Amino acid sequence: MSQFEPNGHQTMVSLHDVHKRYAEIAAVDGVSFSLRTGEIFGLLGPNGAGKTTIINMLAGIQEPTEGEILVEGRVARRSDVAIRRGLGLVPQELAIYFKLTARENLAFFGSLYGLRGAALKTRIDEMLDLVGLTDRASSLVSGYSGGMKRRLNLAVGLMHNPRLLLLDEPTVGVDPHSRNHIFEGVRELNRAGLTVLYTSHYMEEAQSLCDRVGIMDRGRMVACDTVDNLISGLGGATVEARLSATPEEAALGRMREMEGILSLEWLPATPTNPPQTAEIEAGTLRARANRPELVLASLVAALTAESLSLQTLAVRQPDLEDVFLAITGKHLRD
Amino acid sequence: MGFLVIAAKDLRILLRDRSALVFLFGLPLVFVFTFGMIFGGRSSSRSAARIVILAANRDQGAYGASLIAELRHLGLKVETTATEEQVEDAVGGGDRSLGLVIPPGFSRALEVAVAGAGNDGGAPPAHVRVLADPAQAQVASIARGAVLGAAQRIAVPLYMAQMPPAFRAFAEQQASSALRSPVALDMPSAPQSGPASGPSPGDVIIPGFLVYFVFFMANGVAATLITERHEGTLRRILSAPISASQVLLGKLLARALLGALQTAILLLIGVQVMQLHLAHALPGVVVVAAATIFAATGLGLLIATLGKTMEQIQGMTTLALLLMGTLSGCLIPRMFLPQSLQSLSRITPHAWALNAYQDLILRDRTLFSTLPNIAVVIAFGAGFFALALSRFRYE
């Protein structure tokens, strides 16, 4: 049994030392964790970490090379068709038919789960209402906006009223309005008892949505706990200084040696770290410290000594991004 | 019954795709009309060079062999075999387009016929038996002319030899009229229930196109599976409580229904416009069509599991189907192919399906007698489907 397994909760899904290999590549490398009934569990990690492969194995689309997956106490196998009745999958891709209407899409996928007649029609209406597509139910999906397609993608996964919803990066490329709509829908369903496994490489999403998270890197589970426990386990806070010039490596080295600094890094301004001031901004100096109030003065003094112009200075509590950095030594979006 | 749900969905999507419908139904009709205008039931003198006659010479005299030599002299390729039954089997089964049986006593009968030439009443002609594959009826007239011409080339010197030298100059002028018919051909008449006056352009062309275009559906079957894989819908379908075989069966069924519609349209056009004689063969044709559609869709599923991208699939399918279509005789009559390629055609399901159609439409055979051909087509389909199922997985 893994150290990540919870105790004292009803288990919906458990993975025991699961491996998935493609030739010599280990997509999933000895992963063990459990999902408690009724929780929202976030599976986080960069692209290629193995999150989607785990979703595929849970959904019975792929079989593990080694190890065992139990869904509601039954071993998940491709040949066990019935086990998939309780699972709903919302893939990262827009896995819907653009040449069908929303109603036809929902009817098709509902029918695959055995819904027929009045029950099917009622459920279609409920789902259209849930994702706000009732008005466009009879239009071809090809004419929908990206956000509408994404919402329909979610509705299809919920058509058969699953007990476990597998959300595989459901908000990639989604506008804020649709993202909020999706989040609200997921929270509402979770309150009604739906268990959710949610994968993402957006840490802030997971932080706001999930009860517990598992952090994956290169096929392995590197951390698994509640968001609060992971962050408090990291300790300290982060000081972020936005600078108009890039510090020399020697200067960064001197700052790392300062008393009270746990770690320090330079993040050049990039599309994933966009400038936040109108002035020319070279990037962000990010330092983590147990007592940030004690290092602020010496850090500012060091920057002044190096003739580095400070644009903004902020102290913030650590987040899952910091947890991932601390555990793996790299950024989530690297 | 998940496969019915998948089939209904696929049909709905296909029927909304106008360009696919044009390709599926319009293109075959254009081909049929074009090829019908080019080849429609006419013989061609250029055909003679590629015609192969299978001959059984059972004559103990010299003239049987001479007849074969003269045919070769006329530019025809003549292969020999021992028995009349072998000739019947080869021509009846469509392996050879023409057969010639020279009976025992042919030389003696020819001598008698030539000796009696010019007398009142004359002598009965020497008989040879000519067999022609109704599916390649355009060669029958060539055979008739060639055998009679070759016989004449033997009979004239024989006739001259029996004349006194002083009369030979006069006799030479009279030989062709005196030797009007030293050899008679025993050729089967047109089938009673089939085409009354020989095969029509539709009889000759439609069977090949029925097979060729139905097999082109393999492309569509493969493409739909690859598209579903790339767009993520296959992943979603596989996460539903449905087995892989149901998924494949659903895909197969949707295309099979379209294939049936395509076949029906081609047959209707054949009957209405190209004088296809179908009434006597309709039940059998329905069975052959069903077997052919099964094999074609099975091949499509197999191809979908062999390639990863649409480009791979389309390249692979187009090449394979063109090759098989040509090799099998669907596009070009098999008699125009070298013998080695004619034998190779048996490795294609097309050839067996085409043979079955031709048995029913052109050779006036019963459904029962062409069942072996149909069984092979179904075996191809079952093999394709089983292989596709064993290879089908999400990765």
Image: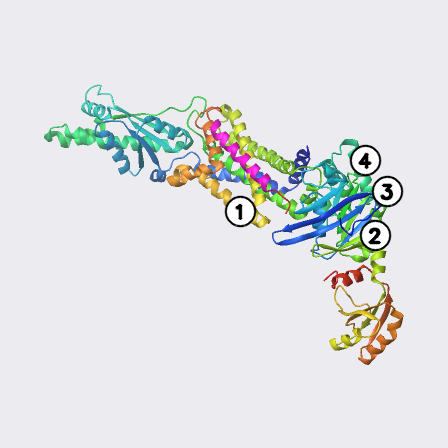
Element under disc 4: helix
**Which residue is disc 4 drawn over?**
A122
Front residue of A37/A153: it is A37
Which picture quadrant has residue A311?
A: bottom right
Residue A28 higher or lower than B200, as above or below? below
Q: Which amino acid does label 1 sit on?
A: Met
Q: Which of marks 4 and 3 is nearer the N terminus?
A: 4
Report the Cα–Cα distance between label 2 and label 1: 47 Å
- Disc 1 crowd rating (10 Å Cα; few below 14, some 14-19, many 20+) is some
Amino acid type, residue under disc 2 in the picture: Leu
Magenta region includes residue B374: yes
x and y percentages locating residue A154 in the rendered image = 77, 46
Chain under callout 4: A
Per the model, the C-alpha gap separating discs 2 and 3 is 15 Å
Name the residue that disc number 2 marks. A209
Q: Is residue B299 covered in magenta?
A: no
What SS does tag 3 mark? loop
Magenta residue span? B371-391
Is residue A290 shown to the viewer in this render? yes
Tell me, for residue A192, which label it has, or none. Answer: 3
Residue neighbourhood size for the residue with mark 4, other residues' Cα within 10 Å, grouped as few (<14), some (14–19), many (≥20): few
Is the same chain shared between marks 3 and 1? no
The residue tagged 1 is B316
